[in-house]
Amino acid sequence: MHNPQLNKDGKLKHLLSIEGLPRAILNQILDTAESFTGVSEREVKKVPLLRGKTVCNIFFENSTRTRTTFEIAAKRLSADVLNLNVSTSSQSKGETILDTVDNLTAMHADMFVVRHSQSGAAHLIARHVAPHVHVVNAGDGRHAHPTQGLLDMFTIRRYKPDMHNLRVAIIGDVLHSRVARSEIHALTTLGVPEVRVIAPKTLLPQDVEKLGVQVYHDMRAGLKDVDVVMMLRLQNERMSGSLLPSAQEYFKCFGLTQEKLALAKPDAIVMHPGPMNRGVEIDSAVADGMQSVILPQVTYGIAVRMAVMSILAGSNDA
Amino acid sequence: MHNPQLNKDGKLKHLLSIEGLPRAILNQILDTAESFTGVSEREVKKVPLLRGKTVCNIFFENSTRTRTTFEIAAKRLSADVLNLNVSTSSQSKGETILDTVDNLTAMHADMFVVRHSQSGAAHLIARHVAPHVHVVNAGDGRHAHPTQGLLDMFTIRRYKPDMHNLRVAIIGDVLHSRVARSEIHALTTLGVPEVRVIAPKTLLPQDVEKLGVQVYHDMRAGLKDVDVVMMLRLQNERMSGSLLPSAQEYFKCFGLTQEKLALAKPDAIVMHPGPMNRGVEIDSAVADGMQSVILPQVTYGIAVRMAVMSILAGSNDA
Amino acid sequence: MHNPQLNKDGKLKHLLSIEGLPRAILNQILDTAESFTGVSEREVKKVPLLRGKTVCNIFFENSTRTRTTFEIAAKRLSADVLNLNVSTSSQSKGETILDTVDNLTAMHADMFVVRHSQSGAAHLIARHVAPHVHVVNAGDGRHAHPTQGLLDMFTIRRYKPDMHNLRVAIIGDVLHSRVARSEIHALTTLGVPEVRVIAPKTLLPQDVEKLGVQVYHDMRAGLKDVDVVMMLRLQNERMSGSLLPSAQEYFKCFGLTQEKLALAKPDAIVMHPGPMNRGVEIDSAVADGMQSVILPQVTYGIAVRMAVMSILAGSNDA
């Protein structure tokens, strides 16, 4: 089957999902991101790679946090950035998503960064746009959030370069997470031999084992000797629903504390995609502790997004 | 009477309405826009004409779509752009429109792009501002939306250069349209010999004939042998009011279908200011069909807005 | 006690409050602002001092007006500007203020312009951020709004350069004003010998005399022979509360009219921080009259904010 993310020369054209991306492309993004980490540390944090290009952040679902990361990345590449919060505008006039995209394309937008509550929205747009236009999925429903997955891989590679010898645990609401699926695919593709998921049965998708992971329902057993602890955010709306008894109860069983973390390897790193629910899925002592790489994740997120955008823009040359 | 849009040398100082603009000014804008169509097709879509100028988009009424077109145009001219959605801010603190404008002028804003639900708001501001400040009307109530009118003229001229030999039909809610009035004035001024309006009686202003148009209430009769079909948007709020039986009924009588379009000349072009109500005033087969120039209208809209802004900024030299 | 606004070399590192700033720093800001007044009058209103820096306007409380002044100032310094209206985003996901700030710092933000409804929010952030990051308080609760205070000092100095010979009256809702406190401290620090406050008892803080001001409850007595009349904004929510009889009654007693202004010195200047309630605390004839310097205040506000930002950014060199 044709991969909608690659052009006919096999170059990355859209970033929609980590699923389906070959290891070579993942490594190209991570290697390119490496070269961008320096840009944000300079006096003048700008390179002219996207100068005169128009990047549209189309957010059909509000997320200041995610929008900010893409806006900073695009501006550091010298692009002109447009923020469109569509929920409050033309959508209410009955204009379809594709009409909105067609209009922006007609204005010679070069790249769309798309956030939508529905799975598949970014794919829909990518299938529709003109050949010179690029789409980045910034989160679609429960489906995918590939730049988050990529920045997590970048972070792991920075702290644990030998990915072929890692034991990684992903902990929490795997069922509703748009991040977990991306992580698992990326880890597997990059050759991580052991990926564990730790969660109550109610927060795991059916047949999760088929993704190539080991399933644990007991956190202490699951954390034993892991190198990387990846926490997932517990959505507020889950906390008092039928899936969970209460936030306190959840913290007791699946919240990451120093005491539980001690079961992992002594040099294990702790990750979280943010925003954190302190005291629900993670204790503040761990979040702000020595093993936490949660803020470096954010820093690397800018470099990774700059890498993705510059690679996409460069794929026109082919 | 003094024309508030022109300075004492007859140069364009504000763009408030197509009414009152001499043909030479209209042609100046269209000719200048011609030179800007290339900018948006370049690798680096930027020219430095407004570098270091501050353009304020003051939207007293929300319109992401219109704001976006002006923001892109201003940024491609290298201006600094400020977006102010005033409905949610100082207006609620009881500050008057003119106090808002005075404040921004005191901050050395160079240009105001104004959208307001009240007719005459842009005129009010233009009368008030300091001599070096320019005002562009981005839509005021039912009154005027001159850049839309201009981009429509630009589109017609591109596809049908001999404007002295055209038959143009404007179809739909003429009564509530801020576009229709601009169109009629522009077409007449540019020498189009036959302009028709096609609408039910309830959606036509009284004495519409006095604008120099021919009135049709039957779409098939009105479309006969026209070169240009200009559809108007039907506002949602009209659809179930006392003016119209229903959206379905409206589509049956005044919706543009392939079958009705066949009555126009074979090479007739179809235009729509957007956003479209597909299946209400226009069928998707027509909107996306061979004769549709709806997306080129959007493309030319950027060039026309760049032209207007650069001409206004240049009128200071006088 | 350590002054959180200064680095160990005594240079300005954060601008949180005028209280605690030595006269030398105030004069440094005012002198630097002097050099920036010219920038906004140029053809190209830009200097490259903050090129490649990321300035984040974090507004936990909406204020388009204040945000605009900082956005213009930062853009004229060539910074990349990010606007974050946090009330509608991550705050609602339970992320703490400091997590938000940590995240933006991890993205290599260089400066935070902070507006918050709670007193002390900017101080909290300043205590928390990394050494190379700068914080500007853009208004925190009733506490402080130092750039407003500074631009007022700049305005007074421009019109009345001999500050050691001035009589200044501050009139209105001193109790709830975040401006009044800043003004009083600034005036005292810069050597103004006589500062009066004029207000009904219900709108004055207890022990206001301890700030070194003379208290008047009668406007006519208080205005007698003053050089500078500084009006305060009356918050709408006070007008019909238990503190005041009515807006009309307030205007009668404490509204500034031409007739009352005549009691001040003939060349007295009239100031207001905006937005004005015309007909409540100030009559339009005065607001727009010969003695009003209300719009010059706005103009100088840009130069003062540019000065503050460039001084803060420069304090890294130490």
Image: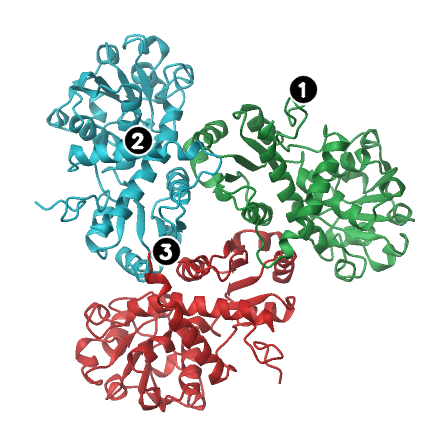
Chain colours: A cyan, B red, C green
* Residue A259 % position (x, y): 34, 8
Which chain is mark 3 on? B
Q: Please state, as top left, top right, bottom left or bottom right, where the N terminus of chain B lies in the image.
A: bottom right
Q: Quick check: B184 left or right of B98?
A: left
Q: Amino acid at mark 3?
A: Val
Residue pushed farthest left? Answer: A1
Q: Which residue is mark 1?
A: C2
Mark 2 lies on a secondary structure that is helix
At label 1, the amino acid type is His
Residue B140 shows in this picture = no
Indicate the secondary structure of the residue bearing disc 1.
loop
Spatial separation of the CA atoms under disc 2 and disc 3: 29 Å
How far separated are the C-alphas under marks 1 and 3? 50 Å
Q: Mark 1–mark 3 contact, CB under 8 Å?
A: no
* Residue placed most toward the observer, B3 or B311: B311
What is the spatial separation of the Cα atoms under label 2 and label 1, in whole angstroms? 39 Å
What numbered label is drawn on residue B44? Answer: 3
Residues marked 2 and 3, same chain: no
Name the side, left or right, on which B108 lies relative to C93: right
* Chain letter belonging to callout 1: C
Up-down relation of residue C137 to residue B299 (above or below): above
Density class for disc 3 (Cα within 10 Å; few <14, some 14-19, many ≥20) is some
State whether residue B120 is above or below residue A103.
below
Q: For residue A194, which quarter of the picture?
A: top left
Kindly identify the amino acid type of the residue bearing the numbered disc 2.
Leu
User: Which residue in the structure is indicated by mark 2?
Assistant: A151
**Quadrant in the rendering for residue B281:** bottom left
Relative to A308, is B146 above or below? below
Q: From the top left corner, tell me how far across and down residue A82 is, in percent.
A: 40, 51
* SS state under label 3: loop
